[in-house]
Image (tube, helix red, strand yellow):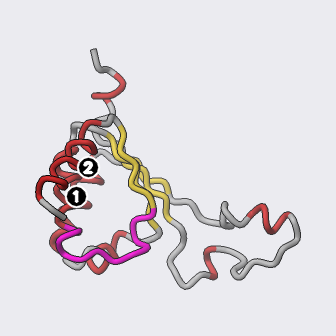
Amino acid sequence: MQTGKLETKMKRYLRSDILVIDEVGHMQLDRQAAEILFCLVCLRYENGSIILTSNKFFTNWGELLSDAVIATALLDCLLHHAHVINIRGESYRLKDRAKAGFKTRHRSFSSWRYPDRRWVIFQLAIRSILFRP
């Protein structure tokens, strides 16, 4: 990505009160993408909230980000003021199909080849949003 376009996008992501990063873990990031994600999280650290969802355990983030050092530093920032919610059980997206009597390929997330679905909510410096003058 060109430097000017990247800076423009980063400024947009930094302006919002809450940044939602959904489905982290469905694709492995190359080193450059991992570094951009790390920079984004660091710039938002204690300045804005992040809601992040992932289907990966924290121990697998080194592989996901192609670098264990970046993963450790990223998780350090994300988890410092975090509320982590681990959701297990039937797939929310497939529940209506099951009610309608359609067979699904997988009965529950525990039978998937991926780890249990993890929805992780990170709230970084939520006071800056709630108590803003």
Q: Give percent across and percent down for residue 87.
A: 56, 60
Residue extending farthest to the right is 101
Q: Give percent across and percent down for residue 103.
A: 81, 78
For residue 130, the mark is: none
Image quadrant containing the N terminus: bottom left
Crowd band around label 1 with a 10 angstrom C-alpha radius: few (<14), some (14–19), many (20+): few
* Residue, disc 2: 80
Q: Residue, x 37% and y 49% (percent of image)?
A: 122
- Residue 34 is drawn in which quadrant? bottom left
The residue segment tinted magenta is 23-34
Q: Residue, x 24% and y 49% (percent of image)?
A: 9
- Residue 59 is drawn in which quadrant? bottom left
Q: Amino acid at mark 2?
A: His
Asked if residue 56 lies in the magenta stretch, the reply is no
Question: Which of the two residues, 10 or 77, is positioned nearer the viewer here?
Answer: 10
Q: Is residue 102 above or below residue 49?
A: below
Crowd band around label 2 with a 10 angstrom C-alpha radius: few (<14), some (14–19), many (20+): some
Instruction: Label 2, secondary structure: give it.
Output: helix
Q: Is residue 109 above or below residue 22?
A: below
Asked if residue 25 lies in the magenta stretch, the reply is yes
Decide: marks 1, 2 in contact (CB < 8 A)? Answer: yes
Q: Give percent across and percent down for residue 60.
A: 34, 77
Instruction: Label 1, secondary structure: give it.
Output: helix
Residue extending farthest to the top is 133
For residue 76, the mark is: 1
Q: Residue, x 22% and y 39% (percent of image)?
A: 46
Image quadrant containing the C terminus: top left
Q: Residue, x 39% and y 75% (percent of image)?
A: 27
CA separation in Å, label 1 and label 2: 6 Å
Q: Amino acid at mark 1?
A: Asp
